[in-house]
Image (cartoon, helix red, strand yellow):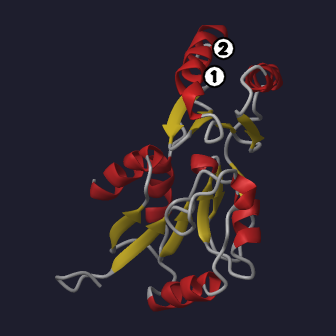
Amino acid sequence: LIANGEPVALFLDVDGTLLDVALTPSTVHVPSHLPKLLDEIADRLHGALAIVTGRPLEEVDRLLHPAKFVAAGVHGGQMRFSNKGKIETLTPGFDATLAADLKKMAEGLPGVVYEDKGSGIALHYRLAPELQSSLLMSLEALLPEYPNEFSICEGRKVVEVLPVGFSKGRALRKLASLPAFTSRIPVMVGDDIADVDAFRAAED
């Protein structure tokens, strides 16, 4: 409950929010008490807790095992509409030629880590922060070659390449319409530029 006593629905980012940011996505540390704590919070909110993340949901489930939650992964490219439901992929298959071009781009920028998420691709430059401008310029140069096929979403030491129209804000709106979440005030907790759209959706 918030100050005025109205019930809330809680939407949580993962990296930088539930977990400390690590040098690479695979080296994050999950506190042993976290899955149980989130389960207890979800119970107290009568199921109105959701994960909204840029990670694939398969990774989230592995990190938070044995807990599972209503969730949006890859900025809404994946969704799970109940904690016992299946992961649904909402995006079209990512263009194989574009993926190959992005991988080649990353290989030409030593220190940039290429991560294929299925519904999107992340290019991490935490190991080489000086390459931010070069990476963004290279991505923007690709846009005319793939008109209306992808968008660029900047984050903290990462650039996400996503199908057009997908965002954490869109994902939050879809999850907020589920029965457990309606008639509650949505509270989004995040730490990065990519979460701003979800903050706006919660405010709306």
Res 177 seen here: no
Q: Residue 169's spot in the image, x, y percent?
A: 44, 49
Indicate the secondary structure of the residue bearing disc 2: loop
Whole-number angstrom distance, CA of label 1 to CA of label 2: 6 Å
**Which residue corresponds to the image point at 55% horizontal and 22% vertical from the top-left?**
136
Indicate the secondary structure of the residue bearing disc 1: loop
From the image, tell me which residue sits under label 1: 149
Res 2 seen here: yes
Question: Dividing the picture into quarters, in which one does residue 124 lie?
Answer: top right
Residue 111 located left or right of residue 187 = right
Considering only vertical position in the picture, is 128 above or below 145? below
Amino acid residing under circle 2: Tyr
Amino acid residing under circle 1: Glu
Considering only vertical position in the picture, is 142 above or below 54? above
**Which residue corresponds to the image point at 35% horizontal and 52% vertical from the top-left?**
201
Considering only vertical position in the picture, is 119 above or below 164? below
**Number of numbered labels in the structure image:** 2
Give whichever of 73, 35 is nearer the camera.
Answer: 35
Q: Residue 165's spot in the image, x, y percent?
A: 52, 34
Residue 80 located left or right of residue 191 = right
From the image, tell me which residue sits under label 2: 146
Q: Residue 101's spot in the image, x, y percent?
A: 77, 19
Give whichever of 92, 22 is nearer the camera.
Answer: 22
- Marks 1/2 in contact by CB < 8 Å: the verdict is yes
**Which residue corresponds to the image point at 74% horizontal and 78% vertical from the top-left?**
65
**Residue extending farthest left:** 4
